[in-house]
Amino acid sequence: RREPSTPPATSRRRKRDLHFRQREGAEGRSLEERLGECSSRDGVPGAAGTCSPQESGMNAVGVRMVTRSRSRGPGAGQQGSREKPAPLRREEAAPGRKSYSSVKRQRKAQRLNVAYEASEGEKGEGVEHLQSPAWEPQDWRQQLENIRTMRSGKDAPVDQLGAEHCYDLSAPPKVRRYQVLLSLMLSSQTKDQVTAGAMQRLRARGLTVDSILQMDDSTLGTLIYPVGFWRNKVKYIKQTSAILQQRYDGDIPASLAELVALPGVGPKMAHLAMAVAWGTVSGIAVDTHVHRIVNRLRWTRKATKSPEETRRALEEWLPRELWSEINGLLVGFGQQTCLPLHPRCQACLNRALCPAAHGL
């Protein structure tokens, strides 16, 4: 037969003691005082047997416990069944001993106590500061120096036919700036030799904003052919020239945002126009050559999928004093050595440092 489950004796005593203590606090009198009142009322001081459980506020078991503790005397508690104290609550830790919850909270707080890099106004306030190291590619300085060595001859197509060499030196300043912008618009998806030929034919007709607006589309298309996407470029050149005449008096904008807003002008063209036409470094100009070489050298945290994504990743770590140099350096290197197909790795000084050299 299955026996009914009963709590251990210690658990029952603990619950009884807690019940008695709660009754003491509620009525403001101890159990022994109430028993004493009952016994003195019957004329027998110190006897508890004549007091009913209802009068004393205890059940019969509680009366027997108090009577038994009196009969044992003051020293009986050390050898007999000593009354156990009520269990400590979590909020009441014993003196000199930490509760489990407080220790757990302290450990969690220690794990979360991480130093950080504070702002300018928080420095010097007793907070531990950590300078997070900036990410940079491995061996990039040596790789860059090797590229400089390989490009020391300045004999790549970009060195003679780039945007810096396509405008008329004798023209007024705003005409020169317009010619720089036009050469950059023609250079997209086009080899430097083809761009230079188109610019030479346009300059022979007097390349200004007014001359382009007076020229019909078919004539303009004939002059710039065979640049890449020449039909779209005819439309963009006409639209941009009209905006420059209406808003800028035939000059080009002096800000990156206004340049990018022009039809047919992308971020790479705008950054180069700011550098060549205005002498201002506004960012890194990234074309297909720069995009390819940066990914081959692993100069970004992760592989990038577009020139604009490469530009943002490159500007995060490359020192700003190198921004104006890096485009021409890498474009010429991509034209001569780090070719899109069949790169000349055996002739490259970075063949031992280039992560992509072993997989090409």
Image (cartoon, rainbow, N blue to C red):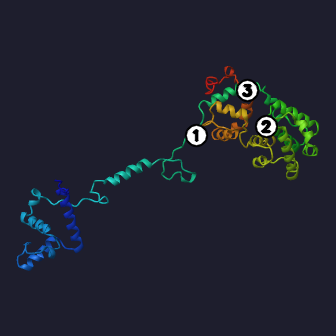
Relative image position of residue 345 (x, y in whole percent): 67, 22
Q: Amino acid at mark 1?
A: Ala
- Neighbour tally class for label 1: few under 14, some 14-19, many 20 plus, Cα within 10 Å: few
**Frontmost residue, 242 versus 11:** 11
Nearest to viewer (mark 1 / mark 2): 2
Quarter of the image for residue 162 reads top right
Is residue 65 in view?
A: yes
For residue 151, which numbered disc appears in the image? 3
Q: CA distance from mark 3 to mark 1?
A: 28 Å
> How many marks on residues?
3
Compute the Cα span from label 1 to label 2.
34 Å
Quarter occupied by residue 343 = top right
Label annotation for residue 184: none
- Which residue: 70% across, 41% down? 308
Q: Secondary structure at mark 3?
A: loop
Q: Which residue corresponds to the image point at 51% horizontal and 44% vertical from the top-left?
A: 130
Left or right of 289 on screen, residue 226: right
In the picture, the disc for residue 134 is 1
- Residue 92 in the image: state x and y as whole percent: 29, 60
Mark 3 neighbour density, 10 Å: few (under 14) some (14–19) many (20 or more): some
Q: Are marks 3 and 1 in contact (CB under 8 Å)?
A: no
Check the image and report above or below for 257 versus 158. Answer: below
* Marked residue nearer the N-terminal end (3 or 1): 1
* 215 displayed left or right of 2: right
Q: Is label 2 in a helix, a strand or a loop?
A: loop
Q: Position of residue 232 (x, y in %)?
A: 83, 41
